[in-house]
Image (tube, helix red, strand yellow):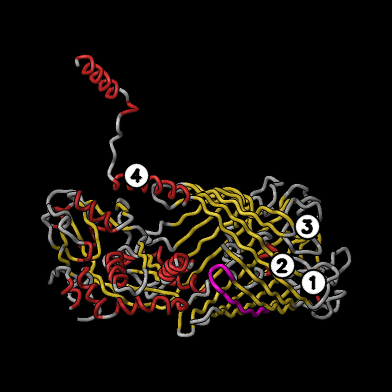
């Protein structure tokens, strides 16, 4: 009996000290659920920092003549109809309270290209200042930063495509804007220094300054929204040769003062933009406009901005450009109608039959000096936030000159675009 | 026989699930929508799920198509209207009830009434101590909602006349968090929908006429429009979902639904 009792006692002792036999204290179902929810919440909060968005634009285009040279990318020489992926954007963003990292790529049948790659650091004290560095939209005007997925016409204005190819540039920028809780949140000031070559490496020591001040407000009844902005670009283009030409009496004359190779020719623009939206019984009506003027160093035959330090002679042009959009949403429907007027004058100092003329020891103006006006009309059907159909017709009119071969009358370069967009 | 029974059960589940609709947005409206939804489902009229997050979150969900009804304690903004137009969404706005917004302090605070100007001074940081408004020598701790909240927007417009909240204001993600914080902090002040006021906090009387009349926030004073901080509570839905949400919306607007509004502590559309 005593032996059995001792054995039982020893067994009980072993059980007591052996943790594997100890029964775990069970929490209540509520505790267990609460712990699980807390874990899930932490995981969800981490995941919410990471966003992947994108859109795909597939389109068919028809033009009046073979090899139309503009239209958001020239048509191939032997075609007046084309089908393709206009944009295939994939954007990754990782956001914390203090920082953001963004990378956006364009993937089409033409290849893979980087569009944005930048970081943002925000001040955690006043939440008013932020510093952006990398490749991102130039802080100029309104249309540059307005997403192509939301824009009501297939392409940006001609002056935007010519003066700011790719919209983005390599640089760093300071933004001043009060937080959403501030009554100053409507005001935004941005300024930065950029390489000036668009989405390309830096090739010279000159940094271009781009700055903008803008306001955006809604009326208290939330039926009107308006905005206005002023922009300034101050930069330079590397002089790769000893020849810089400026306009004189309707032709290009060599600038005697600008003969030093390695100096920088002035690249300077002033811009104004305004936006107005109002809700009425017929729907939301939007009016947007922008104006730019300035000085553009370019080549003899093209007013386009350079994407690297040029090795050709520079031709200085006084440029002017503008656009106006009118967009009407039809209340109660998925339809929007749009009308757009777009003007770009790459050489505001001459017009008409002056273009193409030359003089002794002077350089003639060329097709690169012709003014273009485009009148566009379009219809947009938004099935939902992801799917949109656009039909748009651009009527392009160029300046004519009897002194410029091939441009004595308006070219046949109108374009019809039918585009399907899917966004996520 | 067994197979037929299983099929019928599956179909029944599917049928029940196909009428499920989502309501998302305002935290102020959460207690109301939850009670309405509960009663609606008890009556066998359909399935409804309700989540909060703030009025702004509700509008975003409506734009993205992840909710059938956005509940909001503020009217839709022009920016949101533009996004809805871009997304091809035409919407309908329905006023479901009214809400009186209570200014709440810790129960130990001896201040029991404030003018609008004093409230503005407190929330903008010009008034920093309770002794400046007749209370104890105690620093004021301001609690506010996040910027996506319709309640935040309404207070900024109505009480602060669009001025900034003080930088030191503590931003809370939900109304319940304000109640908890104010109840635990002696010098605290915050704002919540009337339906959230409980014994843990004290609601202040408010004057919008420079101190001539101080009105207590209640259903009665909100209905007779003497309490000045009152606002409509909205449901917004995509017109294409009109048929799906009609039963629920009609239920909320019915006498039965409006009785629930009163029961929960909101202000019915009419007596």
Q: Can you identify the residue that label 4 sits on?
A: A35
Tell me how far mark 4 sits from mark 3, CA to CA: 69 Å
Magenta-tinted stretch: A375-387
Q: Which chain is indicated by disc 3?
A: A
> Which residue in the rendered view is the most extreme toward the top?
A3
Give the residue displayed 32% in from the left and 28% down from the top: A21
Nearer the observer: mark 2 or 4; the answer is 4
Q: Earlier in the sequence, mark 3 or mark 2?
A: 2
Q: Earlier in the sequence, mark 1 or mark 4?
A: 4
Nearest the eye: B228 or A267:
B228
Q: Can you identify the residue that label 3 sits on?
A: A314
Tell me how far mark 1 sits from mark 4, CA to CA: 65 Å
Q: Are marks 1 and 4 in contact (CB under 8 Å)?
A: no
Q: Can you identify the residue that label 1 sits on?
A: A68
Give the residue displayed 32% in from the left and 54% down from the top: B171
Q: Residues within 10 Å of mark 1 (few under 14, many from 20)?
A: many
Residues tagged by mark 1 and mark 3 found on one chain of the structure: yes
Tell whether position B149 is magenta: no
Tell me how far mark 3 sits from mark 2, CA to CA: 25 Å
Nearer the observer: mark 1 or 3; the answer is 1
């Amino acid at each position: 009996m005593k032996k059995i009792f001792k054995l039982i006692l020893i067994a009980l002792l072993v059980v007591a000290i052996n943790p594997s036999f100890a029964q775990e204290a069970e929490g209540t179902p509520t505790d267990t659920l609460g712990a699980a929810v807390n874990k899930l919440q932490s995981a969800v909060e981490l995941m919410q920092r990471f966003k992947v968005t994108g859109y795909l634009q597939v389109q068919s285009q028809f033009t009046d003549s073979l090899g139309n040279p503009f239209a958001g990318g020239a048509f191939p020489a032997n075609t007046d109809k084309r089908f393709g992926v206009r944009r295939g954007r994939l954007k990754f963003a990782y956001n914390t309270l203090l920082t953001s990292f963004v990378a956006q790529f364009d993937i089409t049948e033409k290849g893979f290209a980087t569009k944005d790659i930048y970081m943002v650091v925000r001040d955690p004290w006043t939440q008013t200042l932020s510093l952006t560095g990398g490749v991102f939209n130039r802080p100029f005007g309104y249309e540059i930063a307005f997403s192509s997925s939301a824009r009501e016409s297939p392409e940006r204005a001609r002056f935007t495509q010519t003066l700011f190819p790719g919209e983005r540039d390599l640089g760093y920028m300071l933004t001043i804007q009060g937080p959403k809780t501030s009554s100053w949140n409507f005001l935004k000031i941005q300024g930065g220094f950029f390489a000036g070559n668009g989405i390309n490496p830096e090739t010279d020591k000159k940094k271009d300054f781009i700055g903008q001040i803008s306001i955006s407000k809604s009326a208290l009844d939330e039926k009107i929204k308006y905005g206005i902005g002023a922009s300034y670009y101050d930069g330079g283009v590397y002089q790769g040769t000893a020849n810089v030409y400026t306009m004189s009496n309707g032709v290009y004359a060599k600038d005697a003062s600008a003969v030093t190779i390695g100096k920088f020719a002035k690249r300077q623009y002033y811009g104004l933009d305004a936006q107005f939206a109002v809700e009425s019984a017929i729907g939301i009506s939007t009016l947007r406009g922008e104006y730019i003027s300035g000085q553009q160093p370019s080549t003899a035959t093209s007013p386009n901005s350079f994407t690297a330090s040029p090795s050709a002679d520079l031709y200085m042009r006084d440029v002017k450009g503008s656009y106006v959009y009118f967009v009407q949403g039809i209340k109660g429907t998925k339809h929007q109608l749009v009308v757009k007027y777009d003007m770009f004058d790459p050489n505001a100092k001459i017009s008409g039959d002056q273009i193409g003329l030359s003089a002794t020891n002077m350089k003639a103006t060329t097709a690169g000096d012709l003014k273009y006006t485009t009148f566009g009309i379009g219809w947009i059907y938004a099935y939902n936030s992801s799917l949109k159909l656009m039909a748009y017709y651009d009527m392009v009119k160029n300046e004519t000159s009897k002194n410029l071969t091939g441009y004595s009358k308006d070219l046949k370069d109108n374009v019809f675009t039918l585009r399907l967009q899917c966004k996520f | 026989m067994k197979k037929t029974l299983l099929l019928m059960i599956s179909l029944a589940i599917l049928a029940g699930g196909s009428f499920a609709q989502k309501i998302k947005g305002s935290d102020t409206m959460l207690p109301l929508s939850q009670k309405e939804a509960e009663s609606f489902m008890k009556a066998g009229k359909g399935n409804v799920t309700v989540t909060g997050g703030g009025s702004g979150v509700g509008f975003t969900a409506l734009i993205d198509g992840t909710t059938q009804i956005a509940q909001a304690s503020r009217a839709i903004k022009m920016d949101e209207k533009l996004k809805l137009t871009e997304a091809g969404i035409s919407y309908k706005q329905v006023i479901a009830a009214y809400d009186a917004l209570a200014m709440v302090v810790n129960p130990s605070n001896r201040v029991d009434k404030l003018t609008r100007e004093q409230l503005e001074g407190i929330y903008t940081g010009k008034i920093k101590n309770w002794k400046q408004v007749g209370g104890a020598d105690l620093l004021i701790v301001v609690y506010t909602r996040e910027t996506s909240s319709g309640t935040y927007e309404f207070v900024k417009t109505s009480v602060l006349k669009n001025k900034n909240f003080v930088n030191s204001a503590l931003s809370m993600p939900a109304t319940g968090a304000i109640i908890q914080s104010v109840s635990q902090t002696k010098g605290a002040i915050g704002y919540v929908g009337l339906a959230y006021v409980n014994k843990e906090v004290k609601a202040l009387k408010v004057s919008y006429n420079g101190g001539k009349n101080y009105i207590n926030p209640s259903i009665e004073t909100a209905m007779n429009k003497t309490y000045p901080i009152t606002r409509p509570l909205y449901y917004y839905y995509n017109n294409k979902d009109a048929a799906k949400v009609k039963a629920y919306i009609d239920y909320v607007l019915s006498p039965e639904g409006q009785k629930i509004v009163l029961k929960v502590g909101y202000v019915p559309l009419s007596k």
